[in-house]
Amino acid sequence: MSAALIPVRRALISVSDKTGLVEFGKALSGHGIEILSTGGTYKALKEAGVAVKEVAEHTGFPEMMDGRVKTLHPTIHGGILALRDEPEHKAAMDKHKIPPIDLVVVNLYPFAATVAKGADFATCIENIDIGGPAMIRSAAKNHGYVTVVVDTADYGAVLDGLKANNGATDLTLRRKLAAKAYAHTGAYDAMIATWFARQNGEDFPPTLLLSAERKQTLRYGENPHQRAAFYVSGEQRPGVATARQLQGKELSYNNLNDTDAAFELVSEFSDAPAIAIIKHANPCGVATAASLSAAWDAALRCDPTSAYGGIVAMNRRLDKATAEKIAQIFTEVIVAPEADDDAQALLAAKKNLRLLLTGGMADPLSQGWFVKSVAGGYLVQTRDAGRVSQAELKVVTKRSPSPQELADMLFAFRVAKHVKSNTIVYAKDGATVGIGAGQMSRVDSARIAYRKAQDAAKAAGIGEALTRGSVAASDAFFPFADGLEALVEAGATAVIQPGGSIRDQDVIDAADKAGLAMVFTGMRHFRH
């Protein structure tokens, strides 16, 4: 390995992102550094009055094949890869007249942006960079002698190093930038490989390549003894990864997880204003109504105790009236597509409250991957984008549900999709009135939801449990009739469930005996 300080006398710059390019080029020239460049980068520097030499002039070999071959030349890669203090390398450089290149500044063709624009196959292929990754990898491998820059945000660090070290860079900086360079090319290749697999009709390619950029190092993980960070994939799905935080302290691991759960749930509803209140990634109240303010009242009524310290998500622009109500209880995070100025001003007094604006709603029907780590590997599945319509419901009881029961059943089943299994959700008039989550027994989920509905009724000064006259949704089938009997005890009048048990008829008979209406969806919504 080389000495720690390596003077920079020659740089090669070829960038797609030209942010800060001219200023950086001028600063390098100010240190007496010769600059080599190609194409649009050369043109931008030349027009700005920066002394720059075309790569074709440097190599004595013309750019060809529509720019596909320009830097893939021994004069370039020899200048980058040569070990400066290795006699054989020095002799080869002298023999073939290969000058050393001490700084490589490259960012790659915008492949992701090209794909995102919906470009055709040939255009996407043409935007796969070849020379760029080759130079980046060469420079990173030889970081003992060469500085490599792939991020415009690092221009300042390089210039600071040159200034501090009289035109040289130190090994610490070069090693840090080399690691970043390999991550950059690795992510680029992963992006291309994933795209190629999809073009070939492969949902799950033989080799799984994931790439993401660290957005935030978190204070700790799920618990204080765990370390954590937040990475973003680049998917432009409105939500916690793309949101702007207007106020409040840094989001924690649990905040991020719960906020994602809240926003994904409330995105299920678009026809009317909706509110979802989340605690530990499970909803404790969800409602739709004529206004956000009314939806908040209905959602809070479901479980006012659990709502304390929760996450609140909505599918409409946050207004002052709703903000005033939410501010009356301790809330960790509010996430909304937008917020009125007066709502923002009102919440600004709550210094610990985080307000996130996403700029839009997530599409609950769009496809994507859900990835979970297990010991020694990953479980990968498509996002649960399943949804049943009224036309797809199968009435299996003697009594058919009323129009209001049908509307509430569809609402409750959408909510159940976002509750940890085993799940029972009671709903009435477009609002949850009892939620049982994450129990090993579906009967226990039904009973817990009922008990919480009794507690909520008591808190509201209502004489009977909120579940009286409600509908109930189950995320999966009832293996025995006892689960349905628990719903009858809670006062449910109609049930929506996937069906599919070998004892379905026993459950149907129990529903008929109790006078309930029941429909099968044929779709399960397990969530673990």
Image (cartoon, helix red, strand yellow):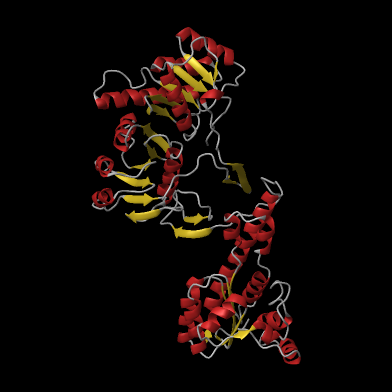
Is 480 situated left or right of 408 in this image?
right
Residue at 27%, 48% in the rendered image: 343
Residue 286 locus on image (x, y percent): 38, 33
Foreground of the two, 260 or 73: 73
Q: Which residue is drawn at 26% across and 44% down?
A: 320
Q: Looking at this view, is 404 or 93 the one in front?
A: 404
Q: Position of residue 304 (x, y in %)?
A: 30, 33
Of residues 377 and 495, the one drawn nearer to the viewer in this rendering: 495
Quarter of image, res 460: top left
Q: How many marks?
A: 0
Residue 82 at least partly seen: no
Quick check: can you spot residue 322? Answer: yes
Furthest toward the top, the residue is 513
Q: Residue 269: horizontal and vertical position, in percent?
A: 43, 36
Residue toward you, 277 or 86: 277
- Figure check: 69 above or below 232: below
Quadrant the N terminus occupies: bottom right
Quick check: 215 above or below 422?
below
Residue 323 point in image, percent of width and height: 27, 43
Position of 242 with respect to 104 (left or right) is: left
Measuring 31% from the left and 39% from the top, which residue is drawn there?
Answer: 308
Q: Is residue 222 rendered to the left or right of residue 385?
A: left
